[in-house]
Amino acid sequence: MTTPLTGSLAKKIVRQLAAGTTPLEGVPHLNVGRERYFLEIGRLLDDLTEGDGADVHFLNADYGHGKTHFIGMIHALAMERNWVTSYVKLSKAEGIRLDKFEQLYAAILRNCICRGLMKERDQAYDPGEANGWPWILDEWIQRHIGFESRAGIDPRSLGARERTVSALDLLLRRANVSGDFASAVRLYANAAFERSSDQDRRLRDAVVRWFACDRVPELREHGILAAITSANAKQILRSALALLRTFGYGGMAIFIDEAEAIQDYSKAQRRAAYQNLRELLDNVDGRASGNSLNHAVCYVAATPIMFVGARGFREYPALQDRIEEINIPLPVLSGLVDYRAVVIDLSASPLSSADRQQLARKIRDVHAVAQHWDPSAVVTDAWLNGLLANYESRLGELGGLRPLCRAITKALELAQQHPQEFAMVDPRDVVARAFQDEST
């Protein structure tokens, strides 16, 4: 079930469409086409919720051709099933490099999103806007305190604290989680009670910094002996995912976007990055020995050069083996799309003209909610059809839907502010400006 389109989310969608992007949480309100992919992904999430196992996929598409949008739909499907999701963009600006696994780990925990967090933020939320992992811990603590309160126990009492920490200990044992991670979770829960205490507040903040891979030597006296580094980050991540399951979540979906950033690394850095990625994927889908993950999916999104270029995945044979498809060379199967393939090539299922018409009307509907008006009398179906025809005549100039989304959004903004003057606007001029903006 799609989350409600609130006014704040509609405004956010309009703002980002004008800039050429779409917020992850807004994607279901704009999605058109590729329904068979999402049917299969929904089935996969259901299977992993009910049984063991995990899965890994790669998204292959050029800039502006729907990778992040596709991730947004998987995010929505995961939210419907009470999964936790985490969207991470490999970016120098955001300080996330794949050759430093602790940076990726810290970003995965920081960017955690769950249904409760989305509801609290009125469905409008950017990954990393709030530290998702402490929010999830706090939510479980408050849930348990509420349970104790309904049983007649003062939620601020020492007894309530002891019973909550004991319940958490039981969950940690059930999840087979121990060591520094378990100590950190217990310490956080203890410190989360007396928020008026400066000492508790400082201790809680210190644990949050430890989860973010900071070195926090003052935690040694509380049983947290080692900082999180590349050497132990994968085990810490496994522990976090196991605990999420005992908290009642169905699983965890990890999205790694813009993996093409790895090409800008040095050769040694690329090798380290590809090794980290291969080990993460092995841990997700059970190829690693020992404690592999259950109830998890990982989607890695990249441009086509990463699948064919010399500096891409093929540079690391152990990773290239993960993405090579097994083809059955039968003529009757030629050209058929495998919706469960390891590599999801979005160019194999392009949107149709009818899909783009539906998208144009969905953008108009979103703008109606954002600005509390009826745009259909000004930006009519006929006007939109003229814009679409002009856009499709220019598709060879620039691929992707960004120019179309920008053109429609800018037209709606102009029409809402100047409805009389808009009657003189030629849709060809609006499309031309959108293509110009996209090429600069």
Image (spheres, helix red, strand yellow):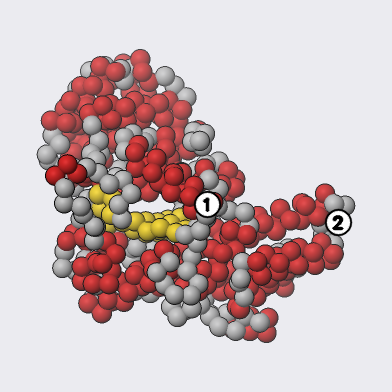
Residue 64: percent from the left, percent from the top?
A: 25, 46
Q: Residue at x 34, y 70 (%)?
A: 278
Tell me how many marks there are: 2
- Extreme residue in the right direction: 152
Residue 276: percent from the left, percent from the top?
A: 36, 73
From the viewer's perspective, tell me whether residue 40 is left or right of residue 235: left
Q: Which mark is residue 192?
A: none
From the viewer's perspective, tell me whether residue 136 is left or right of residue 426: right
Amino acid at pointer 2: Asp
Label 1, residues with CA under 10 Å away: few <14, some 14-19, many ≥20: many
Residue assigned mark 1: 49
Q: Residue at x 58, y 60 (%)?
A: 244
Amino acid at pointer 1: Thr
Q: Is residue 129 visible?
A: no
Q: Residue at x 85, y 64 (%)?
A: 159
Determine whether 183 is above or below 162 in the image: below
Residue assigned mark 2: 154
Q: Is residue 287 visible?
A: yes
Q: Which mark is first along the chain, 2 or 1?
A: 1
Q: Residue at x 53, y 45 (%)?
A: 81
Residue 299: percent from the left, percent from the top?
A: 37, 56
Q: Quadrant of residue 400?
A: top left
From the viewer's perspective, tell me whether residue 369 is left or right of residue 302: right
Query: What's the CA distance linking mark 1 and mark 2?
Result: 35 Å
Disc 1 is placed on an element classified as: helix
From the viewer's perspective, tell me whether residue 65 is left or right of residue 242: left
Are circles 1 and 2 on residues that touch, CB within 8 Å?
Answer: no
Determine whether 318 is above or below 433 in the image: below
Q: Nearer the viewer, residue 35 or 223?
A: 35
Label 2, residues with CA under 10 Å away: few <14, some 14-19, many ≥20: some
Q: Nearer the viewer, mark 1 or mark 2?
A: 1
